[in-house]
Amino acid sequence: MSFTQCKIYFDGSHYIAIPQGSFPSGKGCKKQNTANPTPEQIERKEAFETAYKESKKLPYMQRKKYIDEQLKIAIPDENERKNFIAENNERKDRNRSKKYCLLWRKVRLQRWNYFVTLTFDSAKCTAETFKAKLQDTLKKLVMRKGWKYIGAWEHGGENGRLHFHGIFVIPDDQMVGELVSVTDYSTKRKRVQKKLQNTYFLKRFGLNEFKEICPMDVEHSVKYIIKYIEKEGGRLCQGGDVKPYFIAAVMDEDIICPYGVEDKKLLLSDSFTCIDQDGVVHGAVCPEVIEKMPKSN
């Protein structure tokens, strides 16, 4: 056995193992800046963050110009301002890339079965109470029913009404309420449509849709959620044991070749054997076996 403990993720095509100790000394964690920032540095950073957030509402080609205009007071010198904006845009792009890389690793280790849209009814709650009550409800479903989800909040384009969109893992026999087929008219698509609506959420919150998804639909569903995060400038919501890695020992014969920067990772066979930390062999890798393996962040 070459490696007794590895973090393993699926990149969409292959399983990749990260042996224990490959990235020591907290590599990948935020660097601690021991120097206290000056008031001028704080002012510049705050001005950039505000302008960057506001620029998200503009067409892509207009964003850099908008940020430059907003920072002219904080950074009068044109070259200094240009370098500052370029440096911070690079930081934003780098953080965004890391965030979505981690998101996809989480997504690819789950067996998602529903794409859910939940909308609040003003006769039942306000936007604020809807958000708080739904978060509490989902938290309880995670604890009591084993649900998992990743989602995002969004304000509808037509009337600004708050929605929640998410992909869910709902175990067999753990659905609450009933899924009822209903027919309504979609003003967005301008046609009559059929959908599955959950009676439990309808009674407590308002209109909803539970759409069954298969593995081929997951990528499209996640990109749909990411679109709303970018649009609203918000954050992902997550519940349940949704982690990006599972832990397993790796045998010599299951390693195809070293992989990644400095060859610190390992490219694994598509049918490698999953062995847990106690040496128990669970069989060739597959969704059912992965569910049995310990998970890690």
Image (cartoon, rainbow, N blue to C red):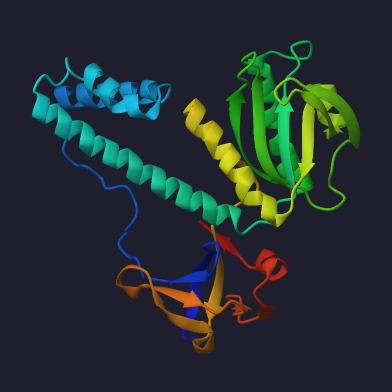
> Please, is residue 251 above or below residue 111 in the view?
below
Q: Residue at x 21, y 42 (%)?
A: 33
| Location of residue 108 in the rendering, given as x and y in whole percent from the top left corner | 60, 57
Q: Quadrant of residue 281?
A: bottom right
| Location of residue 205 in the rendering, given as x and y in whole percent from the top left corner | 77, 22
Q: Residue at x 66, y 25 (%)?
A: 163
Q: Residue at x 81, y 22 (%)?
A: 185
**One can see residue 272 in this view:** yes
Q: Quadrant of residue 154?
A: top right
Q: Nearer the viewer, residue 125 or 72?
A: 72
| Location of residue 73 in the rendering, given as x and y in whole percent from the top left corner | 16, 14
Q: Residue at x 74, y 12 (%)?
A: 122
Q: Residue furthest toward the top?
A: 123
Q: Nearer the viewer, residue 121 or 219?
A: 219
Drawn side of residue 260 relative to residue 196, left or right: left
Q: Quadrant of residue 203?
A: top right
**One can see residue 178 in this view:** no
Drawn side of residue 119 relative to residue 29, left or right: right
| Location of residue 144 in the rendering, given as x and y in whole percent from the top left corner | 77, 44
